[in-house]
């Protein structure tokens, strides 16, 4: 059975100042890509262009763990992943609960593909740092929050994201990743029994198409699920500047160090990649460069 519940209507922001205010107040919402992103840069990052222009670049399959739950990097080429995904042009994509779905899903720091700048400078100047990841394929809808303010931009295909305002994070859980017992419906009886808070709080359901960007403030739980084989997304994390923070009072900080140290470490990791092509900050498939 599935708990009967209807999503709230998402706010659509129309300016950079409204997005900054949403980060500060902890409000999830939608914004058009041209408000935050360089359109010329993102035009080159679609499923078809990845296959044509970046086919030999490597991408990390999203979930590769050994028997002792230790992460193991598993690189494949964008061409190989894209060819495997293309079979779903003519047949149904696997349901979220299918174990094989994770092998059709890759992530890579966008700097491994291109040096183009995606975020508009007038927006970027409000933060200490930004770093971005490209997501390609059948994202299964993993339910989690991020400690950074986050923007998820859909570049091609379709993605459905169930999400919650950060004010409700403590009601849902205190864990970063939640173990969802029924992947086909977040609000199934099994999931409600495991996380009773899901039945108590309002939620949003964003149907992202190319050009839509979802604003996810720090601590906003969300579950992104690809709805087409050619789903490609770019997300951007933002760290606060010391003199002006756009984190809401509901934000969560998991890293134990002060933001000044975190920003310094990110600067050094980016510099290391520029000089020797090796980032100093790596956590599984997440590389900061």
Image (tube, rainbow, N blue to C red):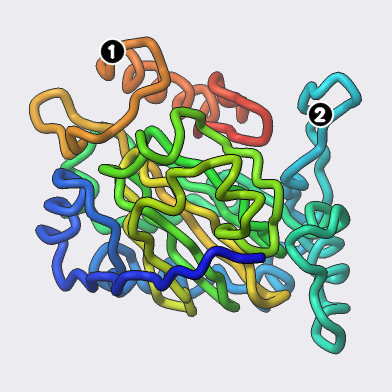
Whether residue 280 is situated above or below residue 246 in the rendered picture: above
Expressed as whole percent of the image width and height from the top left, the position of residue 73 reads 79, 33
For the point 38% across and 58% down, which residue is it? 118
Whether residue 185 is situated above or below residue 131 in the rendered picture: below
- Taking the image as shown, residue 31 lies to the left or right of residue 244, namely right
Expressed as whole percent of the image width and height from the top left, the position of residue 205 reads 43, 69
For the point 47% across and 47% down, which residue is it? 132
- Taking the image as shown, residue 16 lies to the left or right of residue 67, namely left
For the point 29% across and 74% down, which residue is it? 9
Q: Judge by depth and name the residue closer to the eye, 14 or 10.
A: 10
Marked residue nearer the N-terminal end (2 or 1):
2
Residue behind mark 1: 258
Q: Quadrant of the N terminus?
A: bottom right
Expressed as whole percent of the image width and height from the top left, the position of residue 276 reads 60, 24
Whether residue 178 is situated above or below residue 33 in the rendered picture: above
Q: Quadrant of residue 182?
A: bottom right
Q: Residues within 10 Å of mark 2 (few under 14, many from 20)?
A: some
Q: Residues within 10 Å of mark 1 (few under 14, many from 20)?
A: few
Residue 72 tag number:
2
């Amino acid at each position: 059975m599935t708990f009967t519940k209807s999503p709230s209507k998402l706010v659509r922001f129309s300016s950079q100042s409204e997005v900054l205010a949403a980060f500060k107040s902890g409000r999830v919402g939608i914004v058009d890509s041209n408000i935050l992103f360089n359109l010329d840069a993102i035009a080159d990052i679609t499923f078809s262009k990845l296959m044509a222009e970046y086919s030999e670049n490597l991408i990390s399959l999203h979930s590769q763990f050994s028997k002792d739950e230790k992460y193991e990097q598993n690189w494949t080429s964008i061409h190989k992943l894209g060819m495997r995904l293309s079979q779903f042009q003519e047949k149904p994509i696997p349901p979220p609960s299918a174990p094989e779905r994770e092998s059709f899903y890759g992530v890579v720091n966008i700097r491994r593909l291109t040096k183009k700048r995606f975020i508009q400078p007038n927006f970027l100047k409000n933060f200490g740092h930004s770093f971005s990841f490209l997501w390609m394929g059948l994202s299964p809808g993993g339910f989690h929050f991020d400690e950074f303010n986050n923007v998820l931009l859909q570049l091609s295909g379709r993605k459905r994201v169930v999400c919650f305002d950060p004010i409700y994070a403590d009601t849902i859980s205190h864990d970063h990743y939640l173990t969802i017992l029924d992947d086909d419906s977040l609000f199934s009886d099994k999931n409600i029994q495991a996380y009773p808070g899901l039945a108590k709080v309002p939620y949003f359901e964003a149907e992202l198409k190319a050009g839509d960007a979802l604003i996810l403030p720090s601590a906003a739980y969300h579950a992104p699920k690809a709805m087409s084989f050619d789903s490609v997304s770019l997300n951007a994390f933002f760290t606060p500047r010391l003199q002006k923070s756009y984190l809401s009072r509901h934000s969560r900080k998991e890293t134990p160090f002060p933001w000044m140290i975190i920003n310094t470490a990110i600067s050094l990791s980016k510099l290391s990649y520029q000089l020797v092509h090796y980032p100093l900050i790596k956590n599984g498939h997440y590389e900061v460069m």
